[in-house]
Amino acid sequence: MSKNDGKKNLSASAFRKLDVDQYSDNNFKEEDADGGLVGPTGPDESEVLTLLTQAKNTEALILVLKSAPLGCKNQQVKDNARNLTLKVLLSIKPNQIDDSLAQLDRDLMDVLMKYIYRGFEIPTEGSSSHLLAWHEKVYNICGIASIVRAFSDSKRA
C-alpha cells in the first residue's frame, strides 16, 4: 500500500451517504403518539374475579401474570393490572404460596417479582408482610437473579 492510497481513502465521500439527521432528537416519534394502547391491555378483570370467587386462586395468579401488560405505555392499564394482581396475591394464604409457586415457570416468577416490588411501592394495610412472604419464597426458588431481572428489565409491571 502506498502513501497515496491512504489519502485517496480519506478523501472518498462514499461514507457520507448516511443521513445522520434522521437520528436527531427532533425527529424522534413516540410509538404511542395518539394516546392509544400499545402492547397488551392487561388481564380480564371479570375472568380473574370469577376465578377468585371459585377459590381458584392459583389459576387467577397464572392468568394475571401471563396477561401482564409489560409492553404497554398506558399507565392506567398498568395500574389496573397491578391492583388486580395484588388482589390475587393477597387472596392466597401464606401456607398456599409454595403450592402456587410450584405451578409457575421462571418467566412467570420474574413477572411476579416485578409485581411484588410494585406492591411495595404502594402498600395497603397488611400487604407488606404478605408481599414479603411472597418475596422470600420466590427468592428461595429463583435466587438473586430474579431480583436483578425485575430491576433491569425495561418492561416494567
Image (tube, rainbow, N blue to C red):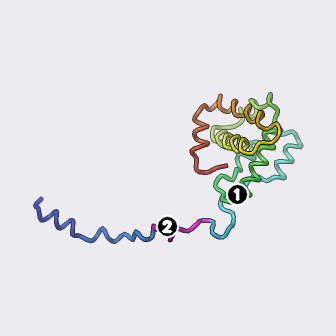
Instruction: Find the distance from the CA under tag 1 to the CA under tag 2.
Output: 24 Å
At which x and y percent is residue 46? 84, 52
- For disc 2, the marked residue is 25
Quadrant that contains the N terminus: bottom left
Which residue is farthest left? 2
- For disc 1, the marked residue is 75
Which residue is farthest right? 53
> Position of 106 compared to 78: left or right?
left
Q: Which residues are magenta?
A: 23-31
Q: Quadrant of residue 150?
A: top right
Residue lying at 69% horizontally and 37% vertically, measured from the top left: 104
Residue lying at 63% horizontally and 41% vertically, measured from the top left: 107
Examine the structure image and report whether residue 25 is included in the region drawn in magenta.
yes
Residue lying at 80% horizontally and 42% vertically, measured from the top left: 124
Q: Residues within 10 Å of mark 1 (few under 14, many from 20)?
A: few
Sooner in the amino-acid sequence: mark 1 or mark 2? 2
Circle count: 2
Vertical position of residue 134 compared to residue 44: above or below: above
At which x and y percent is residue 88? 80, 42
Which element is circle 1 on?
Answer: helix
Kind of residue at disc 2: Asp
Q: Quadrant of residue 73?
A: bottom right
Examine the structure image and report whether residue 104 is included in the region drawn in magenta.
no
Discs 1, 2 touching: Cβ within 8 Å: no
